[in-house]
Amino acid sequence: MKANFLFICFAALACSDVFAQSYGTRIPNGEPGSLTIVPDARSAGIGEAGVALSADANATFWNPAKLPTAEHDFGVSASYAPWLRTLVDDNWLGYASAYKKIGTKQAVAASVKYFNSQAYFASGGSMHAYDLAISGMYSRQLGKNFAMGVGLKYISSSIGSGVINANTLTPGRTVAADLSAYYHKQVVTSTSGEDFNWSLGATLSDLGGKINYGTGSEVFLPTTLRVGGGISYTATGKHRLNVIADLRKLLVPTPNGTASPGLQSSWQGVLHSFSDAPGGFKEEMQEIALAMGAEYWYNDMIALRGGYNAQNKNKGDRKFFTAGAGVKVLHNYTADFAYLFSLTEGDPIAQTFRISLGAYFGKKS
């Protein structure tokens, strides 16, 4: 039983968006935290930002509203990342996605995200935990420059087996919705290949009921609000620079040490998350994290990326740089790699890397 309990604690940390490097106790948290982990190598190389980045198959995670603007009619992608690799083996995240444009103004998409967690005990035993999210999405262009998307997600999550306070652990299952919006505008274009665009994006993800692991209480999902913007400039048709930035906030109650935020409904938790921090407006602003980065493409074949991501010191204090690279082969196939350099001592996500492969077909828009 002790081993089971230790594993449960470990699994919660492994799946959480906020790890043990916290400077305070008022840090919002939702489960399963793996829902918030960035799956793809392209955005992971740009500081883990991507709400307003140009559309690819991984827009299913970042902003499905972008898909009607994708270059190709059809695209698929698969990503892999070992997780907490400096601490444990056999923890990994996998993500697969696909989209199909319907005409020039609509798109449908689907994705599967799987997080695997395995713990081994000194006694020789082991225990397995997992998170699974299956999503379907629809997006439509509502104007020349504006589009919106909706998604429905099935979530199944296990934190292992055992008994806690006479309650037998069971996998938690629920459904959630995603909402997204995207605006982009081409400002300058010329016959020489020069082109300038800017974009804005917003997503509200994992909005749904609580999840119950059989412990006798329900847990908030990690409902997340992301807003972002970006600019893209192409010179002479060969050199393209994308610069983007995202802000994100977890829309779950802030622990305050006295009240019981878990007694609220999921909708109350989302609404109160904008004003329930004991420190008032200043503390609410501390719960907003920043992600930003840049991507350079040469001749639409080779990409170099870099970025920065930061949380407030009182709300997790995770700070890291990212770097990445990508190649496009035969105009249809992509391969991307990203690596994370943590600035927080002892951060368990230090040295995380991600690999993504993609394939795109159909006429280019």
Image (tube, rainbow, N blue to C red):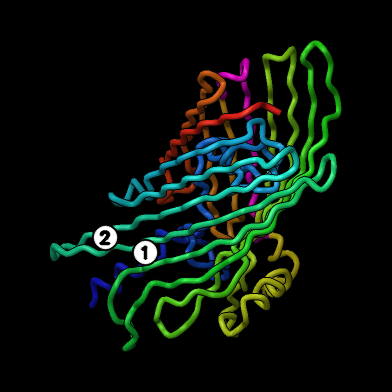
The percent position of residue 211, horizontal first and vertical second, equals 49, 74
Label 1 – label 2 distance at C-alpha: 8 Å
Q: Residue, x 51% and y 71% (percent of image)?
A: 174
Q: Residue, x 58% and y 43% (percent of image)?
A: 99
The percent position of residue 144, horizontal first and vertical second, equals 84, 40
The percent position of residue 37, horizontal first and vertical second, equals 50, 52
Mark 2 secondary-structure assignment: strand
Q: Is there a contact, CB below 8 Å, between mark 1 and mark 2?
A: yes
Report the front residue among 43 and 291. Answer: 43
First-in-chain label (1 vs 2): 1
112 vs 75, left or right, is left
Amino acid on which disc 1 is placed: Ala
Q: Is residue 294 magenta?
A: yes
Report the front residue among 341 and 328. Answer: 328
Residue position for label 1: 11
Amino acid on which disc 2 is placed: Ala
Q: Residue, x 48% and y 28% (percent of image)?
A: 335
Q: Residue furthest left?
A: 124
Q: Residue, x 43% and y 72% (percent of image)?
A: 172
Q: Residues within 10 Å of mark 2 (few under 14, many from 20)?
A: many
The span picked out in magenta is 286-303
Residue position for label 2: 119
- Give the number of callouts: 2
